[in-house]
Amino acid sequence: MAKKKPTVAIVMGSKSDWPVLEHTVNTLKEFGVESTVKIMSAHRTPHEAADFAENAAKNGYKVVIGAAGGAAHLSGVLAGHTILPVIGIPVKGWALDGMDSLLSTVMMPKGVPVATVAIGKAGAINAAILAVQIMALSDAALKRKLVSYKKNMAKEVLKADAELQAELGA
Ligand code: RP5
């Protein structure tokens, strides 16, 4: 069977971001969503990043996810060059524990939003889920998968609680 066309574009600032971004790709896969992953930097390859974002909609992407650490301007630059929704993942940097990445991703000026998720792995997973939620607005099959994802999540919590209660003899 032919591979589905990727609908989510993931752009990370460096290969060193990959251990975090792998969670985004894998979560999208759980929903059967294909993605493209690119390394492009707001500072080191600014022209390529701008060009990619400018052509993202034309190339069939529905959502763009940006991820960078430190002076994390990548998601903002992508958002400045596309009208697609942009989700930003702050990757934990090397000096300020991710606060630098968080603030430089989230504090966008009015008119150019970046939907910023949590720092690191939780954010990487949530970026994928948020992308699926956006696409599910016009995709009934994706919507069904989201409903069952939430149900499974609740089931796991209830199971963990039942196990804890048994352990505690409550
Ligand atoms: C950012 O600087 C990247 O997104 C990465 O999180 C960080 C460090 O990059 P490297 O020096 O490891 O390439 O632009």
Image (cartoon, helix red, strand yellow):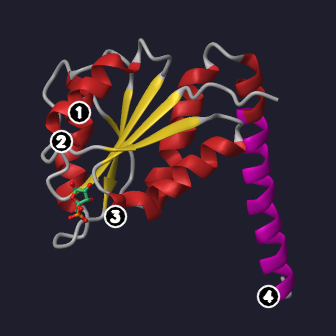
Q: Nearer the viewer, residue 129 or 21?
A: 21
Instruction: Check disc 1: other Cα within 10 Å, few if <14, some if 14-19, many if 20+.
Output: some
Would you place residue 102 above or below residue 2 in this image? below
Figure quadrant of the N terminus: top right
Tag 2: residue type?
Thr
Instruction: Check disc 2: other Cα within 10 Å, few if <14, some if 14-19, many if 20+.
Output: few
Question: Residue 164: image x %, image y %?
Answer: 78, 79
**Label 4, label 2: how far apart the Cα atoms are:** 56 Å
**Label 1, label 3: how far apart the Cα atoms are:** 19 Å
Q: Which residue is mark 3?
A: 16
Question: Which dot marks residue 168?
Answer: 4
Ranked by sequence position, the earlier of labels 4 and 1 is 1
Please name which of the two marks, 4 or 1, marks the residue nearer to the observer.
1
Q: Tell me which corner region of the image, top left, top right, bottom left or bottom right, holds residue 34.
A: top right
**Label 4, label 1: how far apart the Cα atoms are:** 57 Å
Q: Is residue 158 magenta?
A: yes
**Label 1, label 2: how far apart the Cα atoms are:** 6 Å
Circles 3, 2 touching at the beta carbon (< 8 Å)? no
Q: Which residue is mark 1?
A: 48
